[in-house]
Amino acid sequence: MLPSQSPAIFTVSRLNQTVRLLLEREMGQVWISGEISNFSQPSSGHWYFTLKDDNAQVRCAMFRNSNRRVTFRPQHGQQVLVRANITLYEPRGDYQIIVESMQPAGEGLLQQKYEQLKAQLTAEGLFEQKHKQALPSPAHCVGVITSKTGAALHDILHVLRRRDPGLPVIIYPTSVQGDDAPGRLCAPSRWPTRARSVTY
């Protein structure tokens, strides 16, 4: 029996709609890290999966127009970092996140970038045997292409000093960071004009 002053009564549809709007308005976009499980890709091309940690899990969806920008294939058990919007799927009353972007987490990201670069260089044929040249033994002179102020140069000279004292070393100073670094590193015609011998 209802009390004389009845409280607001929600239909199930209105309740779910209200909760969805609250979630979307109050939470906004968030970053979430977790482990992928129950990954699936139906014919629609959308991705459906669960993100979990040791204590909890949440359902996720990543629609085709977003997942087509992901540069790797998510795997069960993979740790990822996602940028997502939190919402509620009204027909079932299920709380879920809609993923906008995804990347491997931690070391996985570094490994992924390494594998992508390796695949790119392999496709370009740069690892083929015909491109490899035998190093002379013993070496008569060593050329080093790097920044003249970086720690790498100090390490190289230290090793050479220990292994082969008196070996001539020629330094080709160049930028190794920044947008212009690839062009400078791949311009051998410019190296001789910038070279200088080093005594160590």
Image (cartoon, rainbow, N blue to C red):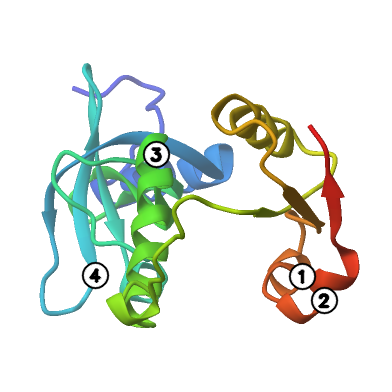
Between the C-alphas of marks 4 and 2, the distance is 50 Å
Asked if labels 1 and 2 touch by Cβ distance under 8 angstroms, the answer is yes
Residue 68 visible in the snapshot: no
Q: Residue at x 36, y 46 (%)?
A: 111
Q: Is residue 92 above or below residue 56?
A: below
On the image, the x and y values in percent for residue 76 come to 13, 45
Q: Is residue 36 left or right of residue 114?
A: left
Residue located beneath label 3 in the image: 105
Residue toward you, 55 or 10 = 55
Which quadrant holds residue 125?
Answer: bottom left
Residue located beneath label 1 in the image: 184
Q: Residue at x 43, y 45 (%)?
A: 110
Answer few, some or many: residues within 10 Å of disc 2's Cα (few below 14, many 20 plus, some between 14 and 19): few
Q: Name the element at disc 1.
A: helix
Residue located beneath label 2 in the image: 190
Which mark identifies residue 46?
A: 4
Instruction: Give the number of the mark in front: 3 or 1.
Output: 1
User: Could you tell which of marks 4 and 1 lies nearer the N-terminus?
Assistant: 4
Asked if labels 1 and 3 touch by Cβ distance under 8 angstroms, the answer is no
Q: Is residue 168 left or right of residue 25?
A: right
Residue toward you, 47 or 195 = 195
